[in-house]
Image: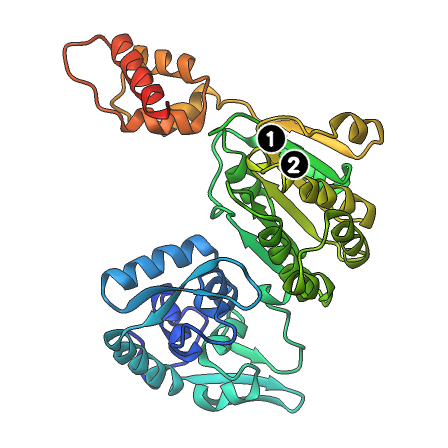
Amino acid sequence: MVKAGEDLGPDTLTVNERVLLHLRESGTARDAVDAFPLTQPGIADTLGIRVNHVSRAVKHLIDHRLLAEGTTMLRGEVRNRKVYTVTPEGHALAQRLAAEVARRRVVAVDASGERALAASEAKRLIAPPTLTHLLATMDAEGRVDLRRPASPSARDVARFEEGRPAPQQLLGREADVLSFREWLDEGPTVLAVIGPKGIGKSAFVSACIDDSRPRFWWSVRDGDSPAALLGGLGTFLADLGKGELRARVADEVPEWRQAAKILARDLKAANAFLVLDDLEAASRELVPYLNAIIESVPANGCRIAVLSEEPLPARSTLLAEGRLRELRLRGLDRAAARALLPRTMLDPEFEKVYRLTEGNPLSLKLLAAEDTPGGYSPEERALLKVLRMRQDEG
């Protein structure tokens, strides 16, 4: 807990306290005009931290009955998002935090020099005028420089993500990461990340991309309609200042050729990065629209990563035109696979498991969770686990 009368610094509050303070200052209405600040990505953007750090913080705060979880549909989006609001218990704590932070001293730097003032006064000199934003704009010495223009937040960089997994540390993918970064720096405009189910395609790409450019991520699900896909894409383009597709979808879903023409216009000079995940799950109705996106992106200087279990239908054409690079993800090496399994697993059982799964990360994790009765050799236990896992999949 912070103490009154001390200097305020960027590390004065813990992550949990900053989350609580931010949500208090963002209001509690789940049906707000723009509830993005109440989502995990919105909290991460405001605080300048990773989404996985926010995930841990909100879980802790919910466990202690300081936050409540709900859902709402954000402006322009087609699926509900989880949002978080402060409970009465949390509000009481957040109010004490705000009062104590407001009394702390801040050094503001402007054209006339430096001056010390209370945080409650300093926040009025910035936009938005919140204590959360004040903490986020401080340098390591606790100064707020009013002379420099505020750098754009992550929210100012257009972003729409549906189904992107939280970035996590990768195991045994060093060479693949290097290949991805080489493609991003100087490769052709389309990257096909290919591999079997469970190999970690989504986790891999999520860990490799950064927040420096506008980004659209769509994970295809069974039953996704053209209206849902174009609705998400329309929201993304509207954040780039191009509202035609969103307006068209609100009136009537355009035919895929019309959608392609709009994309060709609106993606010009966007420098955007797009990800289409789980392409094999697309319905026959959705496929032409996905193909239209893949075709439109390269023509406009953007980049797109397409994740699929099988090569792209237009593979031959794209390769012949020099617009495609393929990255085939294979199983983990023995060292990385070993790290996913219990340390108590004996070497003979591990070797059998590794050969049967071919290092597939999802299969390894499922096998690690399987129990087997006693009285079997390590090799037999490994085989039993694989058989049970495949029965469950069937």
Q: Which residue occupies the foreground of this view, 87 or 331?
A: 87
Q: Quadrant location of residue 285?
A: top right
Marker disc for residue 176 = 1
The reply, left or right, for residue 275 in relation to residue 137 is right
Specify whether residue 307 is in view.
yes
Which element type, helix, strand or loop, lies under badge 1?
A: helix
Q: Residue at x 47, y 32 (%)?
A: 171
Q: Can you say which quadrant of the picture contains the C terminus? A: top left
Specify whether residue 8 is in view.
no
Amino acid type, label 1:
Asp
Q: Residue at x 62, y 32 (%)?
A: 193
Marker disc for residue 180 = 2
Q: Is residue 193 above or below residue 45?
A: above
The percent position of residue 390, horizontal first and vertical second, equals 36, 20
Q: How packed is label 2: few (under 14 Cα within 10 Å), some, or many (20 or more)?
A: many
Q: Which residue occupies the foreground of this view, 201 or 20?
A: 201
The reply, left or right, for residue 366 in relation to residue 146 is left
Answer whether labels 2 and 1 touch (C-beta < 8 Å).
yes
The reply, left or right, for residue 104 in relation to residue 95 is right
Q: Quadrant location of residue 238?
A: bottom right
